[in-house]
Each structure stands twice: as C-alpha cells, then as structure tokens.
Amino acid sequence: MKALQFNVTVPRFIAAKALAAFLGRRVFYQGPLRTVRLAEIPEPDPPGADWVKIRTLACGFCGSDLNLICLHDSPTASPFTSFPCVIGHEVVGEVVEAGPEAGEFAPGDRVAVNPTLSCQPRGLSPLCPSCRAGRPGCCENFAEGTLPPGLFIGICRGLNGGFAPYLTAHASQLHRVPGELSLEAAVMTEPAAVAVQTVIDNPPATGEHVMVIGCGVIGNLIVQTLRAFAPPCHIAVIEPSPFAADLALDCGADEVIPVADVFHRTSHSTGARIYKPMLGKPIAMGGFHRIYDTVGRGATLNLSLRLLTAMGTLSVVGIGRDVKLDLTPTWLKLQTVRGVYAYGFTQWDGRQRHVFDIALEMIRRDEIRAADLVTHRFALEDYRRMIAVNIHKNRHRAIKTMVVFAE
Ligand SMILES: [Zn+2]
Ligand SMILES: [Zn+2]
C-alpha cells in the first residue's frame, strides 16, 4: 500500500534548509530534497493480543505536520521521534481486525485514535508517574518499551500514522465515534481534545477577561470550548486572517483586537492601565486574566506576558523554535506560564473520563461545531496540493484540511 512517509538525514536537513532560503518551502515536498513522499510499504499486522488493525477513513493535517515536513521543529524533542515514519495523528478509522485481548472493540467499530504512545501502548508496567496520575500526554517513557521512540503515531518509526490506508493501535488508544457524527466532525476529535484540555487546565472564572492568540483550528476550538463550558467571560482574540477572525467571532469570540492597536484596545476592553518603559514595548497593569497562545513565537509570548494581569496564567499551546523572552512581567506580576500538550483523564459529569470522550460528546451535542472547520478534502495522492494549501492558508481560506480515503 502507498503511505505518506517522512524522512530526513543531517546532510539533507542542512541542504534543504539552505535551498529553502532561495526557493521557498516547496523544496520540502517537491524535488530531490523533499522530506515526504508516497512510499510503498506493507500492510501492518497488530503487534500484540491487545492491539487492533484499523482501516483509515480520514486523517486531518495538523500545523505540526507542516512544521515537521518543513524542518521547523526544535531539535529538543528529537529524542522522542524516530523515522522514516508515516505521518498523521488526527485519525478516524474502522476496526477491521481485533486481537483476543482488545477488550470491547470488534471489527466494524468506528473509532477515533488517541495518537499518544505512552506506557500502555509501549507495554510498560508499572506505569510512569504521569500515566499513573491520568496524564499520559506527559508520559516519561516516550523513548522506552516495545516501540521505537515517538511521542505519538505520526512521528514513530514502528507504527503508521493516519496518512496510510491501514494502521495498528493499542486498545487503550481507541475511542468510539458516535454513529451520527460525520467524518468531518469525527476527524476533529484530536484537535478538539487539545482545546478541551487547554481550558480544563486554565479555566476562567465568571466575568474574567481572556485572550486567544491565533484563531486557526486550535484557537477557534478554544473559543468554542470556552463558550461551551466556561462561565460567562469576555473573549478577545488576535488573528490576522480576516477569514479566520470572522469565523472566531461567529464561534463565540467577543472582539478581534488588531495587533497594531493591542495595548490601547486592551486598556479599553479590560480597564488596564498601560505604561511606557524607557525602552521597548508598553506593559499593562491589569489586563487579561488568562491568555491562550496558540502561536508560541517570541513576539506572541512576550506580548502575552505584557498583557497578562497580576497572578494571571498564560497557556503555551503552540510551540516552535526557541525564543527569547523578557520575563520581567512574570517576575513582577507573579504570573504562571503553563505548557499544554495532549490530553488525559479528568472528572466529568461525576465520573473519570478521558478528554477524547469529552471532546466527542461535545461535538455530538453540537457544543463544538467541529465539521464547520473542515474547509478542504484531498485524496492521499494529492498530498502536495494539501501541503501547499496549508502553507498559504489565508490565500486558500483554509482552516482544517484532511485526507479522505476511498470506501
Ligand atoms: Zn496535531
Ligand atoms: Zn507513562
């Protein structure tokens, strides 16, 4: 079968980066230095009795897939990746083969796959402290156990990601998709779970002012999640694309703040007083109680700290290259900066639930309008066009793009 495979070596990394400076990012998916290609690989077999084989129905393309292909990731996470690997971690599929210990799952079941490769899929016992605490997203064993290194499927040499017609998954990675959900809605489960976990970990109180920076897929889903289960709060967003900004307003944001006018508008919106230092950018006293930065660049993180109120919390949702931070506001205003990665278990409706199941339930109830965010569908063979659309999202009015596999 044909699958979308990523691979790179150190010499090719250096050459591709140098060439991209002149020719642009197309060198990463076209021509001799490309990092992805359609490779012929064998159909996978479940590696254990508690594993299943899945026929892929659809897989979403994530911003992190683009970062991987364009060699934009920080090398810090490289001990927890291995390649060549089949990419894609927003997977919906149908179980076609279930091992005798795969629990409740049987052929014909439609499932969303939690991509995290934590202690359980890695066959490790006892579980690490994070997995024991119900937060397998920050498992300590991403480079241990029976599988090659990999935080999740899509960056692990030993298991296919979702840009392949078939993959295998451990039973603990599976979440049943309600029958009435469309493929478009179901494929949004993984990004919706990121947004739900973000809000659970940094929940606003009634009447607070919050800001979402970047309203692509994750930012938009954070706005929707805030509206669905946070108490009434004021939501401001920063989003340069008019198309994405309008969609954020439509999904529950109160205002879009232009970045050029951000200090004045913050003052107007939150009542903050703005002070101008001898040098450099202004700083707010007062400001936003919670900021969710889905971009994670130096400019947005520094801006966040300057706009965040005393004892406010900044959620770092997006991540990219290393950044230079002025931590003076954090020091002066006792702010908390917390990371957001993946998802785990939480108390919900009186019982312990996985955030994937909460996201699926919110999508089913239409509290998260997930399918509305899917703007483009492609066949796997058209992957180059899909990557190009993701590089120029504004031009193509793209939010979420996905590959749909033939029935
Ligand atoms: Zn992702
Ligand atoms: Zn673990």
Image: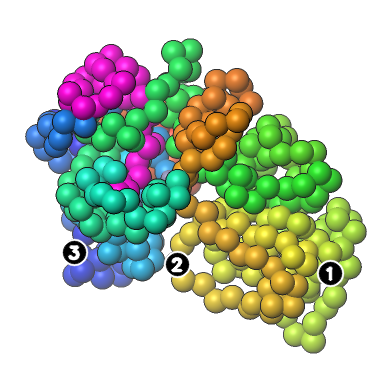
Q: Residues within 10 Å of mark 2 (few under 14, many from 20)?
A: few
Q: Secondary structure at mark 1?
A: strand
Residue in the picture at 21% in, 42% down: 159
Residue under circle 1?
285
Name the residue nearer the viewer: 37 or 97.
Answer: 97
Q: Residues within 10 Å of mark 1 (few under 14, many from 20)?
A: some
**Label pair 2/3, CB-CB below 8 angstroms:** no
The first of marks 1 and 2 along the sequence is: 1
> What's under tag 2, amino acid-wise?
Arg
Residue in the picture at 71% in, 39% down: 230
Q: Secondary structure at mark 2?
A: loop
Mark 3 beta carbon near ligand 1 (under 8 Å): no
Q: Which mark is residue 321?
A: 2
Q: CA distance from mark 2 to mark 3?
A: 19 Å
> What's under tag 1, amino acid-wise?
Met
Name the residue nearer the viewer: 308 or 199.
Answer: 199
Task: Report if residue 156 lies within the magenta region.
Answer: no
Residue under circle 3?
9
> Which residue is at the far front?
126
Question: Which label lies toward us, 3 or 1?
Answer: 1
> What's under tag 3, amino acid-wise?
Thr
Q: Secondary structure at mark 3?
A: loop
> Which residue is at the far bottom?
278
The region drawn magenta spans: 90-119
Side (left or right) of 278 relative to 112: right
Q: Which mark is residue 56?
A: none
